[in-house]
Amino acid sequence: MHLQTLAVHSGVDKDTAYNSVITPIYQTSTFRFEDIGKTKGYDYTRTANPTRKALEENIAALEGGTAAKATATGMAAVMTALHFLKSGDHIVCTNDCYGGTERLLRTYTELFNFQVTYVNMTDLDAVRSAIRPNTKGVWIETPSNPLLSIIDIKALTEIAHSTNALSFVDNTFLSPYYQRPFELGADVIIHSTTKYLNGHSDVVGGAIVVNKPELVDRVQTLVNALGVGASPFDCWLVLRGIKTLIPRMKMHEENAGAVAKFLSQHKNVKKVFYPGLPSHPGHELAKRQQRGFGGMVSFEIKGELKEANSVIRSTKIFALAESLGGIESLICHPQTMTHASMFPELREKAGINERIIRLSVGIEDVNDLIEDLDQALELIHS
Ligand SMILES: *Cc1c(COP(=O)(O)O)cnc(C)c1O
């Protein structure tokens, strides 16, 4: 079946109690046993819950994985994935990864003696020379946040496998509609479902997807042991959101493309970061590796922090907020917001300076979005 059909139906229409068309919310912590040792498949919601199961089947189907686990947040999924590794293991990580991922890796370096090397993953030789005998994980995020660099999942996965390391792909920015990491060799996919999968800015959630039989039991055991499973109600909302994933993604992309084009022609904009622009260094790779370019656009303003602040304060439709991937447009200043927790030296090295502004382009009418940005950019010098 095609992705849009899977999005609408996978895991959903399974209610044998009353034949409800939509998955019920099993808002219960526990389940009655039919007899000693005999259940209907569920005993306790931390371990498993039918509403969560429906969402997990849906996400697994969209990514083409064997199993998925829905977690309370995206970071809970990141944390669970890191538990595939053990104390003393070495991880090669993209140098402009999500700020929270960098913070957790730093914590695990202190707590569990993880070793982490951050590299610019657009440079495959740099990745190869970062590999050590104890490298057990390669952490990939593409397009990256906030600069939308594109890294080659297939090439990186081959490097990971040549040294018996797992390749992890955080697929939050594109969703399974625009990028299918398992088809490129990835071992583990991570999502913050808070973003495009739910798409309506009313849930925090995450997912971890695997496609290797030996990882299926492991991920189930970890989610149960760590207690990071998502609540039934949140799962129900995400499942509801996913049904419109594809039409939303198409509109996000159409709007983002028009916004990127507008910005790249504006006199007060120094540089636009959007993989759909032919001038983007990752454009050709993005065309090959992705089905589309997504809804995130970043740009560097001409001037300094003062000018960036002026634009951020002046938009009326774009709301100043963290997060992304919802139907409404958001504007953010990565240096002081999403990437504030990042080690400053690493942030500088990754090119995240004070003049960078990140947009999550929503599905409003694009003419209104462009007009909003235009008036904010015009105010810079007044
Ligand atoms: C938001 C985000 C996360 C973390 O997800 P939460 O739901 O906020 O915990 C991880 N990776 C990426 C790329 C994100 O955008």
Image (cartoon, rainbow, N blue to C red):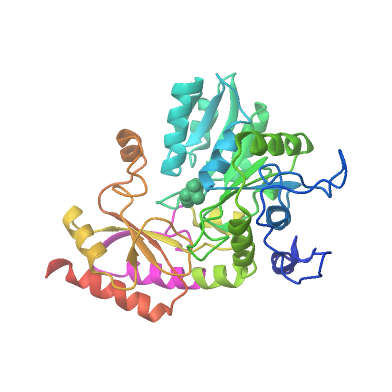
Q: Quadrant of residue 332?
A: bottom left
Determine whether 133 is above or below 116 in the image. above
Q: Inspect this view and state whether residue 290 appears.
A: no
Q: Nearer the viewer, residue 346 or 113?
A: 113
Give the magenta part as a residue range. 253-281
Q: Position of residue 165 (x, y in %)?
A: 64, 29
Locate the N terminus and report the quarter of the image it occupies: bottom right
Left or right position of 380 against 128: left
Expressed as whole percent of the image width and height from the top left, the position of residue 371 reads: 31, 78
Task: Name, please, the residue furthest toward the left.
Answer: 382
Q: Nearer the viewer, residue 38 or 75?
A: 38
Q: Is residue 185 visible?
A: yes
Say which quarter of the image contains residue 351: top left
Q: Is residue 151 above or below residue 329?
A: above
Whether residue 113 is in magenta: the answer is: no
Q: Is residue 109 left or right of residue 370?
A: right
Q: In this image, 112 relative to 36: left or right?
A: left
Q: Is residue 259 magenta?
A: yes
Q: Residue at x 65, y 41 (%)?
A: 188
**Residue at the location (32% across, 49% down)?**
337
Q: Quadrant of the C terminus?
A: bottom left
Q: Quadrant of residue 17?
A: bottom right
Q: Position of residue 302 (x, y in %)?
A: 22, 59
Check the image and report above or below for 238 versus 337: below
| Labels in figure, total | 0
Give the x, y percent position of residue 319: 33, 66
Image point (67%, 38%), residue name: 224
Q: Residue 108 or 16: which is nearer the viewer?
A: 16
